Image: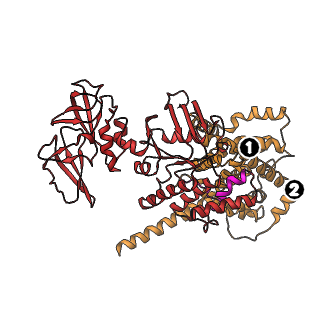
Amino acid sequence: MKRTASRQLQYVLTTALAWSLALLIFFPILWMMLTAFKTESQAYQLSLFFMPTLESFHEVFSRSDYVSFAANSIAISGGVTVLSLLIAIPAAYSMAFFPTNKTQKILLWMMSTKMMPSVGVLLPVYLLWKNIGLLDTVSGLIIIYTLINLPIAVWMTYTYFCEVPKEILEASRIDGASTWQEVCYLLLPMSLPGLASTALLLLILSWNEAFWSINLSSANAAPLTVFIASYSSPEGLFWAKLSAASLLAVAPIMVLGWLTQKQLVRGLTFGAVK
Amino acid sequence: MASVTLRNISKRYGDSPEVMRDIQLDIADGEFVVFVGPSGCGKSTLLRMIAGLEDISGGDMYIGDERVNDIPPAKRGIAMVFQSYALYPHMSLYDNMAFGLKLAGKSKPEIDAAVQKAAKILHIDHLLDRKPKALSGGQRQRVAIGRAITREPKVFLFDEPLSNLDAALRVKMRLEFSRLHQDLKTTMIYVTHDQVEAMTLADKIVVLSAGRVEQVGSPQTLYHHPANRFVAGFIGSPKMNFIDGVVVSANAQHVTVQISHGGVQTVCVDGSTLQPGSKVTLGVRPEYLRRDDSQPTVHGRVSTVESLGDFSYLYAESDSASEPLICRMPDGEHAANGSLAGFSIPPHHCHLFREDGLALPRTQAITQAVAPAH
């Protein structure tokens, strides 16, 4: 009896802890969502009770061209996802199925580039992009995002490919499959769940990337992160409008993340848990 | 249908020393050949070299009359069955078996006929719509064999195909391999570490050790005339007894050996190359070692008796041998643990190995004496 009671208490406590942590993490997003529906003066009040209004959204839409920013975001994150996978799949294929004694070192080196602060290479990249005419272009942003996310893409794809038994590909080679057929008919269908997770992660990462988009784009190629940033500038901070703009920017990717969270979690923990 | 010929085949990885060297092998058309050896002896590597999955570092390999060293696996006219089955998990059994034919650009009716035929041979024609995960181990193995059959290869390659199955199913599938070979009459090369599989299936066994061919021959030849101590110890279960001794006298008909800590034993082998005083090892299989307390040549202290129903194995610690002596006793004979036991060895059932491990040729009398046993 005593044991069941203590177990129940433990259950209640852990549940409470999990909920509080989740709420703590979610709180800024919740607050942003609430503020987006307030007026500028209400935005400074901490009250949870107010009359919701779409005033800020109207103003945001009239002041800037949301659709063009959103279109850029879609083009950039879609482009990055496709391009990264196009490069990562052959790279991971050769590393997973034809490893050399340097393969592990190359993988580690690729990941180590993620440790470098982006601002460290801002100046050379900026000048390079300016000189070859990539500044403020969608393709310029696709290239830099792809370069940034490629280590993650290769690493993840490599992990999924390593789970595919080598004999299956050998069997297909005996059956007469060319490398191309081997990848298209066997490897890709067999690692589809993993590749889908990688694609989702790439989509989310490039949608949310702000540092490079703010520095390398201004009007033509600016995605939604630049759109948000434009509301935190010269005239001072207007919380309600900033929140409305932010909500508009993150809503699509949040919905996507929500719908695909099972796949995403499964993909990210794949290989880690047997 | 084709023969397989290996000439001076060697294998090395990168700059490291050769792991296989100077392999010479002739496999006749339609023969069932089994590669056998302990783990890491190179038997799977050799099979994979025949398949084209491993590069050949040196030498020439022929399938039929064609030199295949630089020909990709699909064009060698071979089919391979893997230990892990290696079925395509996202395809139905039908597609698994049809995959190779589709890639080869065969027409639909041709593919269908080939798949249905193979499925009938293997009794899996009612399962063709299923995915591999819905099958048992034995059924998966059949699909893997079916996939090989549909390709109508000149040579079948099997890489430890029964290792993942339970004991009962293994016996059943072993018989099916035999039947398959009789039906198809195609050259088959089969890798296993299980010497029972090797003995029962093979027309010819190739014993490998540490990247070298130790002996090639029929199961009977390997059992009764092992070329060296390694083959003698590897073929046969439980393994052959090895007893230390020193040559007393030797001629072309027989050798007399003083067994260490034992009596004097005559062995019917050609000892013309031996000198009195040289060290030798006597070999005798458990079924030929006799309990004999009247005129024993070897003694031992009984440590265990394993009863297998119609017969039992007696294990005895002896000063004459580094490992316990094993003696097969008929049902009804008993021995108490810890008791002293004497053994004698029939001269014509005894093998003799020189200090370098090579077997001395057994004389005519032995072959005749052995003949009635099989």
Q: Residue B12's x, y, as percent?
A: 53, 31
Instruction: State whether residue A205 appears in this view.
Output: yes
In the rendered structure, which segment of residues is drawn in magenta? B85-104
The secondary element bearing badge 2 is classed as helix
Q: Residue B281's x, y, as percent?
A: 26, 34
**As drawn, B241 above or below B161:** above
What residue sits right under mark 2 in the picture? Answer: A63
The secondary element bearing badge 1 is classed as helix
Which chain can be seen in orange? A
The residue positioned 44% from the left and 48% from the top of the image is B198
Chain B drawn in what color? red
Q: Residue B77's x, y, as percent?
A: 64, 45
Mark 1 or mark 2: whose residue is earlier in sequence: 2
Task: Look at label 1 and name its amino acid.
Answer: Tyr
Residue extending farthest to the bottom is A1
The residue positioned 60% from the left and 64% from the top of the image is B120
- Chain where mark 1 sits: A
What residue sits right under mark 1 in the picture? Answer: A145
